[in-house]
Image: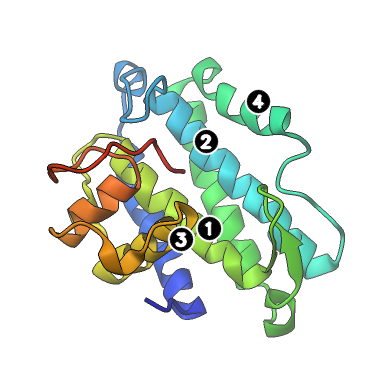
């Protein structure tokens, strides 16, 4: 499926609302509960999503000003953002998440059409136009909303997003998107993403994203 820039912008907003709802109202014990990602509590996960917004905000700043601003100063810097989570209280984490989401949205809303076409470099070293930022963000938000393990499943994600996600992950895993397992789209997406699914007879894939 060919995804459009306007699709990605819409998914970013919808994903933000979904993730904030999934993270809302967490008590301290609930924050300490394991997420669906091995070795990560919900504190790790919320910190990761908040830090991701800050990092993508660096790319938006790059696009807006021409000032080269990588997502992360180093791999260690990225890891440090995630590890902040276990050391923060629930209200501190919730505040960071809320502020980072709002700041990224404000920064993206301020970009002009020309600035959106500016080239930036992702954490994986890919040179892409800034128009790729909303897609990168929407993936984080929707998939990690499921990982929070608070009642959100792949079946709750928008169908057009799931179709784009399947194509994206299949390409990254070097799989033929036209020959994926038969079954409901949400289950195929969950399998490709290395998350729990209801498909049978297919090899286990490691976590993606």
User: What is the distance, in whole Å, between disc 4 and disc 3 at their CAs?
Assistant: 29 Å
Rendered position, 103 above or below 4: above
SS label for mark 4: helix
Quadrant showing the N terminus: bottom left
Task: Tell me the residue that label 3 is attached to.
Answer: 171
Residue at image location 32% in from the left, 21% down from the top = 34
Which residue is located at x 41 percent, y 19 percent?
Answer: 39
Task: Quote the CA–CA distance across marks 3 and 1.
Answer: 15 Å
Where disc 2 sits, the SS reads helix
Task: Identify the secondary structure beneath mark 1.
Answer: helix
Report the mark closest to the observer, 3 or 1.
3
Q: CA distance from mark 4 to mark 1?
A: 20 Å
For label 1, the residue is 136
Q: Which residue is mark 2?
A: 48
In the rendered image, the vertical position of residue 133 relative to residue 192, given as above or below? below
Distance from Cα at disc 2 to Cα at disc 1: 14 Å
Residue that label 4 marks = 80
Around disc 2, counting alpha carbons within 10 Å, would you say few (fewer than 14), some (14 to 19), or many (20 or more)?
many
Percent position of residue 69, x then y:
80, 52
Q: Earlier in the sequence, mark 4 or mark 1?
A: 4
Can the viewer see residue 20? no
Q: Position of residue 123 (x, y in %)?
A: 67, 47
Q: Total marks drawn? A: 4
Answer whether labels 4 and 3 touch (C-beta < 8 Å): no
Numbered disc in front, either 2 or 1? 1
Task: State the residue at coordinates (18%, 40%).
Answer: 151
Q: Earlier in the sequence, mark 3 or mark 2?
A: 2
């Amino acid at each position: 499926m060919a995804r459009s820039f306007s699709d990605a912008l819409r998914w970013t907003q919808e994903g933000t609302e979904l993730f904030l709802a999934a993270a809302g109202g967490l008590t301290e014990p609930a924050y300490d509960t394991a997420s669906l990602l091995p070795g990560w509590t919900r504190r790790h996960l919320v910190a990761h999503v908040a830090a991701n917004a800050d990092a993508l905000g660096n790319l938006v700043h790059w696009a807006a000003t021409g000032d080269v601003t990588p997502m992360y100063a180093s791999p260690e810097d990225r890891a440090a953002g995630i590890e902040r989570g276990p050391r923060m209280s629930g209200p501190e984490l919730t505040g960071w998440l809320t502020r980072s989401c709002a700041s990224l949205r404000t920064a993206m809303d301020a970009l002009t059409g020309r600035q959106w076409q500016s080239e930036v470099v992702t954490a994986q070293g890919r040179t892409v136009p800034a128009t790729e930022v909303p897609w990168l963000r929407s993936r984080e938000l929707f998939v990690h909303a499921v990982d929070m393990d608070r009642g959100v499943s792949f079946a709750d994600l928008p169908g057009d997003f799931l179709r784009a996600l399947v194509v994206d992950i299949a390409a990254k895993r070097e799989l033929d998107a036209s020959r994926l397992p038969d079954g409901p789209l949400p289950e195929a997406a969950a399998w490709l993403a290395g998350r729990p699914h209801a498909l049978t007879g297919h090899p286990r894939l490691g976590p993606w994203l």
